[in-house]
Structures are given as C-alpha cells and as structure tokens.
Amino acid sequence: MHITRVGFGAWAIGGGDWAAGWGTQDDRESIAAIRHAVARGINWIDTAAVYGLGHSEEVVRQALVGIPASERPYVFTKCGLVWDESDRRAPPRRVGAAASIRREVDASLKRLGVERIDLYQMHWPAGDGTPLEEYWQVLLDLKKAGKVRAVGLSNHNVAQLEAAEALGHVDTLQPPFSAIRREVAEAELPWCHAHGTGVIVYSPMQSGLLTGRFSAQRAAALPQDDWRSRNPEFTGEKLERNLKLAAALAPIAARHGTTVPAVAVAWTLAWPGVTGAIVGARDPAQVDGWLGAARLELTRDDLAEIAAAIAATGAGTGPASPLTSQEQE
C-alpha cells in the first residue's frame, strides 16, 4: 500500500460516552470531515473497535457509503481492547486470546461494511496473560486467510517487535509521537527503519496541545467526558511548557505560509522511518488546518529551531531532532 503522508484519525469521532472519549461529537460533522479529507487527497483512515465502543467504525462506514468505489480510502483498525457494554465508562480490558480476536475482526468487518480490513493492528500488548507470540500468530493467520491485508502492532516496544518479527513480518508499528512525546525516536523508529516496518504515528499534535489554538483556559474548561481533562500534560507546569513549545512553532509556520498544526505534524514526518501521521478532525475546517503537512518539508534550520525550543521550554521527553549532531553543526 502506498499511503499519503497524513491520514484521517477517527478516535475523536467515537464520541464521549466511554472511558477515553473526546466529548460529545456530531456524527454528521464527522462524516463530512472524512469525506472532505478524502476529496482533498487523503487515502487512509485509522480507527479502532474501541473508539466509542464500536461507534467510530460505524461512522466510518456511513462516510464510506458516500464515496465512489474508485476513490475509497484504505481502512485501518485495531483489536485487543474489549469493553463491557453494561458499563461503558469502565476502562476496556487488554485481551489477546485467539477466540476474542477472531470475534473482534468479524465484528469490525460488519461495523465497517468492508470485505477486508486493509491494516489490522493489535492495539496494546495483552493484559490477560496471552503471550505476544500467540496473538501475533492469530493476526498472521487472519492475513493469510485474506480477512486483512496487512498486520501491525500499536504501542509495542522493540523487544516485542523482535518477538513478533521472528514469527512473521510486522508490516507496521503505530506509536505515539510528537514534539512533546518523543520516546520512540530512541529505539522503535530506528528498529522499524532497519526492518522495513512502516510507521504511522498517532497524536502528532499531542491531542491538540500543538495546534497553537490551545490555552490554559481551554484546558481548564475541558468537560469531564473528555479524557484530556484527566491527563497530566494538560495541567500545571507540563501544560505551561507544552504551550510555550506550541508558540515557538508559530514563526516557522509563518515563514512557510502554513499553520502551526502543519508544522507539528511535519516535524514527525521528518524522522527517518516515519511513513505517515494520523491526524484527527471533528469537522472539515479542522482537516484544512493540517492538510498542509503532507506537502511541508521542514528545513535543517527549522528542525534545529524546534530542537532549541524543546530544550528551552523543557517540554516532553526523548530525542529532540532527527538531525545528527554533525548535521546540526
């Protein structure tokens, strides 16, 4: 699969009625956002069964109905997080049992209304005692059977990637990655680059913090059904540092005639090994705010300036630049 540098992230469109929701969402706006992204050239959507406890996949299906078959985007989804329908606010359980994954893939195929899932990913390492080798073999078997086209891991580390690769190729990794959350640049990105494993990063704008439109007031006003209201990056000293880093991206955006969100996303795409970035949107206007990242190539000076801003603000953790020390000199 040849994917565009940015793809549509469908986490927020799952709505707010579950443990990791983003607050109330208008499905009509979500559908319009997806169709707008596809019309503007985006060729993949990333969702998960757990987003909205099945609702995000259902919304994606509704959006696909209005798109001609020749223009249909690739559809990526995930498994391994199982919820209790009688207690929607309870944290989903991390389940790797073979029978559970087989039930999940059939349920996702039905909700999405597709004959085959283009990329199927294990959302998190199993927490039910199932060894990685067991659940990874199930995904490889689903690929062999033709139910999914490619298989990947999300939120897994290098040791886990190595164990999976020994059984069958890991087509993709989906890690969190932004100018604030940079840990995977240390080991996982180099491993994927060396092993021909694609990387589609999530939260490249750190869930809104790097949009240039966030503020301490907005963070304080987040509703209780928005998971960010309980996240430490959105409070206190961490929030202050993060907002200062976002402000430092504005001059770079101005030089390129683009937006702060586009700069934040393009920063992740500048790293060797990163194939694409997943970017969410709740309406068509938000899509237009980050589409420019697909064309934006940050210069060495831009990257050095962002690294300096990271150091000056103390925001986040992990390597601060894709440039080698020699290149930065």
Image (spheres, rainbow, N blue to C red):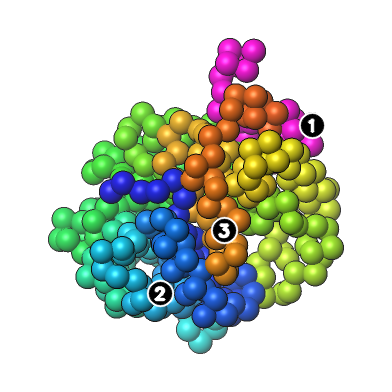
Residue for point 51% across, 68% down: 33
Identify the secondary structure beneath mark 1: helix
Earlier sequence position, callout 2 versus callout 3: 2
Percent x, y for residue 260? Answer: 67, 47
Region in magenta: 307-329
Residue 219: image quadrant is bottom right
Q: Circle 1 sits on which residue?
A: 312
Q: Which residue is mark 2?
A: 63
Q: Is residue 315 magenta?
A: yes
The residue shown at (38%, 63%) is 77
The reply to whether residue 79 is in sight is: yes
Taking the spot 47% from the left edge, 66% from the top edge, the residue there is 36
Along the viewing direction, whichever of 61 and 163 lies nearer the viewer: 61
Residue count near mark 2 (Cα–Cα under 10 Å), binned few <14, some 14–19, many ≥20: some
Regarding residue 98, the answer to whether it shows in the image is no
Whether tag 3 and tag 1 are in contact, CB under 8 A, the answer is no
Q: Residues within 10 Å of mark 1 (few under 14, many from 20)?
A: few
The location of residue 75, given as percent across then percent down, is: 34, 62
Whole-angstrom CA distance, mark 3 to mark 1, is 30 Å
What kind of residue is marked 3?
Answer: Asp
Quarter-of-image position of residue 287: bottom right
Nearest to the observer: residue 292 or residue 234: 292
Residue 66 percent coordinates (x, y): 36, 76
> Can you identify the residue that label 3 sits on?
288
Between 28 and 193, the one nearer to me in the picture:
28
Name the disc covering residue 24, or none.
none
Disc nearest the viewer among 2 and 1: 2
Compared to residue 50, the image places residue 267 above or below, namely above
Q: Amino acid at mark 1?
A: Ala
Q: Residues within 10 Å of mark 3 (few under 14, many from 20)?
A: some
Q: Secondary structure at mark 3?
A: helix
Earlier in the chain: of badge 2 and badge 1, it is 2
